[in-house]
Image (tube, helix red, strand yellow):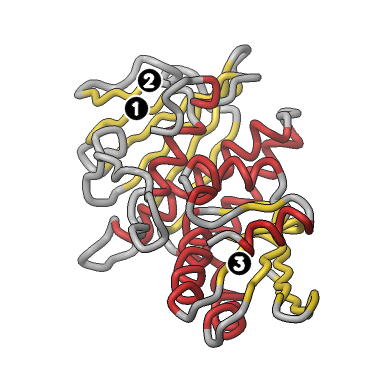
Amino acid sequence: MTLTRRTERLALPETTEPSSQIEIHARIEQLPDLEHWVEQLALEFLLPPPLVQRIDICLTELVSNVISYGYPNGGLGTVRIRFWRQPEQIVIRIDDDATSFDPTAYVLPGLPSSLADATSGGRGIRLVRHFTDELHHVTAAAGNQLTLVFRIGGTGMLSSADSRQ
Amino acid sequence: MELAVHEIESGILGINLSGRMDISGTQQIDLKFTALASTRKAQILVDLSNVTFIASIGIRTLINNAKAQKLRGGSMVLYKPNDQVEEVLRTTGIDTIIPIAHDIDEAHGAFGSP
């Protein structure tokens, strides 16, 4: 998996129309709409179930984070998610208007060694890094732009020897 | 999400969870799950076989209740997660702090271990 922080936009699908997109308010009540959208993508683009699960968990974790922590001063944010079906990979781009947060730079806490040691932070980001093949973050003028790449038939970090670090 | 409870045998309480353990799903079962899983000492077998999806919020609920149960002198075992749910549990290291069992003998062994 590749983690990057970029100051310029990733030269990926910016010039092509997304295969599908959704815009939601940054509210917990909107998460079922996101789930439904992913189900529709699976049907429309004939995505294999393991890939759908990877996309599902990454979007759930990342959008939940934006909703929970992205607007500390209140206000109703907007999250736009675009999906590109490419021959070898799926590219998903999440644009928000939330406070800046770079999940590629987040330092993961170590895995817990006992129940008593288990803290509540960092699991969502760990899952996103595990299930994506590439993850890119840009601090945009309005908020954040995250780009997730899922190789078709890939397994994220599963095949990597350091997947449990 | 839905939650059903049944006494498996003396001393082991089975809690069957089903559905999608995301934010809204976890909120639906959290209070009832906590009341069952951590308010009195017991061996809690959490049947995950009908859980189709688990996010970090769901993991947090499992950990909080496993911690509380351990403080009461009991224990918790996670039972028969599907492959995707198990991968999420293993990726976050939960399998090393709450045992995962795939059959009842394995569950007995896990309850028996310190």
Q: Position of residue B13 (x, y in %)?
A: 71, 77
Q: Evaluate if marks 2 and 3 touch, with contact meaning CB atoms under 8 Å apart.
A: no
Q: Is residue A56 left or right of residue A79?
A: right
Give the chain letter at badge 1. A
Give the chain letter at badge 3. B
Whether labels 2 and 3 belong to a single chain: the reply is: no
Whether labels 1 and 2 belong to a single chain: the reply is: yes
Q: Which residue is mark 3?
A: B25
Q: Is residue B45 left or right of residue A28?
A: right
Q: Closer to the observer: label 1 or label 2?
A: 2
Q: Label 2's element?
A: strand
Q: Is residue A2 left or right of residue B6?
A: left
How crowded pointer 3 is (Cα within 10 Å; few <14, some 14-19, many 20+) is rated as: some
Q: Label 3's element?
A: helix
Nearest the eye: B45 or B111: B111
Q: Closer to the observer: label 1 or label 3?
A: 3
Q: Which residue is mark 2?
A: A2
> At x 73% / y 73%, what residue is drawn?
B14
Q: CA distance from mark 1 to mark 2?
A: 8 Å
The kind of residue on which mark 3 rests is: Gly
Q: Position of residue A160 (x, y in %)?
A: 48, 20
Q: How many marks?
A: 3
Give the chain letter at badge 2. A
Nearest the eye: A24 or B86: B86
Q: Which residue is mark 1?
A: A136
